[in-house]
Each structure stands twice: as structure tokens, then as C-alpha cells.
Amino acid sequence: MKRVQFSFAIVLCLFSFLQKSFSQVIYDNRVYRPSIKTVEFYNTAKEGSFPVIGLGSNEQLLLAFDDLGSNTRTYNYTIEHCDAQWNPSRISPTEYLTSFTEDRIMDYRYSVSTYQKYIHYELVLPNRNVAPKIAGNYLLKVYENGDSGTPILTRRFYVVNPRANIAAEIAPSNNVALRQTNQKINFQIDFNGIVIQNPYGDVRVAIMQNARSETTQLNTRPTFIRGTSLLYSDISANDYPGGNEYRHFDTRSLRLNSERIARIFRDTVNTVLLLADRSRIDDNYLFNYDNNGGFYVRNQEGSDQRVDADYAQIYFNLGMPGATTGQDVYVVGKFNDYVLDQRSRMNLDAGKGRYFFNTPLKQGVYDYQYVLVNKDGKPDYTTLEGNHFETENDYQILVYFRPPGARWEELIGYRLLNSGRK
């Protein structure tokens, strides 16, 4: 009995230490070190897909990233269970992991014949050393030399135990003034053999647009209850600005200019100048195929894009006559996790009425958009891009359930909804 108590105390101490070490971690998709580039994380069944897998299935997730430089580093990783709002579940790792609490990333390769030297790292989850035991939200944390206090990146992923069916539709906004711009999500949840004692407290539903965490709307109360079905159609809830199709550029080849490339310079580094952009607020809607903010690494002149695709310094420029120093503009996309910070902020040349920005990106196809932030600090995603009901968007619907007396929330339903497909 004493041995069991002693072992349990060790587990609790380890759990407390890990939580304290990660107290400064942001529970979202983030890169904490500038040398870490081109982070990809998706279900291996489809490149660039939403990082969700079925509990106990054969599905896996692939994490890939580059570390700029020529020296390898020791990177470790762990995962942590979270609730629907991405707060730590405060349960022991032994309750949500089937094996070890952490492991080391062993799969890495050096870049080949590139101007920019880098080390390419890959990790597949779940694996025999780290695997989730229960459904729910998880945060993957990667850090150096076993020191959990120095994270290099974090990534959200989802493990679903499908016990709920989701029927959903996209309709024009109930607000007449927004019918030409907004897309409203109405949905119904049917449960498979689950008794919901308190639908107003045991079930929560999160919706995201294009897998962007800042667009999350959390539904805590169904509009109607019909037998074992919950209906969510509140007049003001889940009403999203449609936005516009993403801008894009193509650097699959650094020898020939593609559609959105103005000039390419190749010397000791690769430099790519994009064509000048302008505001699209007054433009009519025009369908343009995009990747809903995503990117794909590609190299037309290589044989293995993971290690022979080169980096290029990409120069963006946006014309905005009359711009003032009180207006900040950012360039965002999945390539930088849509984060508004100094690494995505453009520089204003007031004399030319233009914003400029440059960043190193690996060869491939990239979506991006411009975000305006005024003095009030609130991001404006439509003034520079336009806003249309017809815009093609993905919506992720996630259903969470906390059984009575349970200490964590499980993910029991997932549905991908696309505004362009009926």
C-alpha cells in the first residue's frame, strides 16, 4: 500500500512540475523561436487538412517544421488534454495518455542544394511512445533539450470519439443589413445512445471559420430541444462575415515568374518581389480558387520538396493612399498562424502611401490576407479585403460532452461544412 501511495505521489509531483513549466505557454498554434519555419500539422490522409483523428483509429497526424541553420538540436515533445475553451483539464497525464508523458523527435534531415541551410524535422502522432487515451482537445508542445520551459512551438489537435451526428446548413444572415456579406450557420445534433441529462450544461459546441482559432464561437445553450436532438438556430449566433477569397502567390519555381510574381533575384539568397496589392473593399465578388488561408510546400525543380525546396525573402507591398501612423497593417495566413505581432506587421512609407513587409518563406503556394488595426486595437479583417456572402469558406463544428460527475470534456462529434458545397 505504501509503495502505491509513493508512486501516485511521484505522478502528481511530475504533473504539477509540467503544468508549472508550461505556465507561460499560449494554448494555441504558436511559434516561439524565429528560426522555426514552415510548420505543417495535419491528418496524414490529406495534406493540409484539419488536425483531427478518431479515438482508437489508425489515423495519424504529421508534424513537420524547419529549423534554419546547419546544426541539429534535441527536440522533445508532449501533449496535454484541454477543455472546449482550451483551458488545461487539470488531470494527470496517466488519465489521458496510454504510454510515456514525453518523447524525443528522432526524424530529421539536412537540406540539400539550397541557399538557405536548414534541418527538416518530422513527427507522427499517435505513436508507440505517446498516444492519447481519451477523446478531446489536445495541445502538442515541442521544446528543446527536455526543458519544458523553453517551448519552440505549440499546435492544437483534436481526438474525436464519434457519438453524435451533426446536420448543418449555411444560410444568409437573419439581419437584413448583413445578408449580402454574412454566412450564418444553423445545425442540429443527434446523439447515438447518449443520455443527456442537462443539455444546457453538459454539451458545448464550438464553430470555427477556416480553422482559425480567433473566429471560434462557443454555443452553450441549444435554441430548441426535440427528443434526443438539440437544435441551434438562434437569430444572432454563429453569424460570420463571409470575407473574401484569399490572395495568393506561387513560388514553386524560382526560375520563372508566376502569376503574382513581379521579379525574382538569385544571388547568395533568393529574393522575390510580389506585384503591388491594393484594397478590395469596393470590388464586386469574384470567385478565385484558394486554399482558405493554407499553404503547400512545393518545388518544381526538385525531387524531395521537404529538403530541397529553398527559402526566399518574400516582399509584400500594399498601396493605401492617405494611410496614417495610427493605422497598422499586418500580413497573415496559415504560414504565420494568423498572429498579429511584430513578425507580421508591415512598415508604412507615408510619402508613397504604401505599406511594405518581407519575410522568409519556403518554396510553395501560399494564401494570405491583409488585416487593418486602428487605434482602438481591434482587428478589421474586411476593410482591406472586402466582405461577401458568396465567399467559399470551411467551417469546423466540434461537439463536446461532459458526463455528470466527469472531470474532463470529451469531443464526441466533428463536422466539416463548406459554404461552396451543398
Image (tube, grey):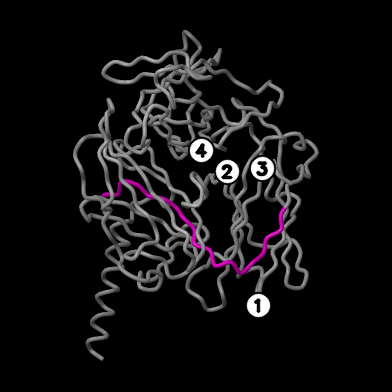
Asked which secondary structure carries label 4, the reply is loop
Q: Is residue 358 left or right of residue 116?
A: right
Q: Nearer the viewer, mark 1 or mark 3?
A: 1
Whether the residues at callouts 2 and 1 have beta carbons within 8 Å, the answer is no
Residue lying at the far bottom of the rendered structure: 1
Q: Residue at x 42, y 22 (%)?
A: 357
- The span from disc 3 to disc 4 (Cα, nearest Å) is 19 Å
Q: Amino acid at mark 2?
A: Asn
User: Residue 294: which disc?
Assistant: 4
Residue linked to disc 1: 195
Q: Residue at x 53, y 44 (%)?
A: 212
- The span from disc 1 to disc 3 (Cα, nearest Å) is 32 Å
- The span from disc 2 to disc 1 (Cα, nearest Å) is 32 Å
Where on the picture, by quarter, is residue 36? top left
Mark 1 / mark 3, whichever is N-terminal: 1
| Percent coordinates x, y for residue 237 in the rendering | 69, 51
Q: Is residue 180 left or right of residue 78?
A: right
Residue linked to disc 3: 240
Q: Nearer the viewer, mark 1 or mark 4?
A: 4
- Residue 157 is a magenta residue: yes
User: Residue 300: which disc?
Assistant: none
Q: Amino acid at mark 4?
A: Gly
Looking at the image, which is closer to me, 63 or 14? 63
Residue linked to disc 2: 210
* Label 1, residues with CA under 10 Å away: few <14, some 14-19, many ≥20: few
Q: Which residues are magenta?
A: 150-168
- The span from disc 1 to disc 4 (Cα, nearest Å) is 39 Å
Where on the picture, by quarter, is residue 385? top right
| Percent coordinates x, y for residue 386 in the rendering | 65, 27
Q: Residue at x 57, y 32 (%)?
A: 380
| Percent coordinates x, y for residue 147 in the rendering | 23, 54
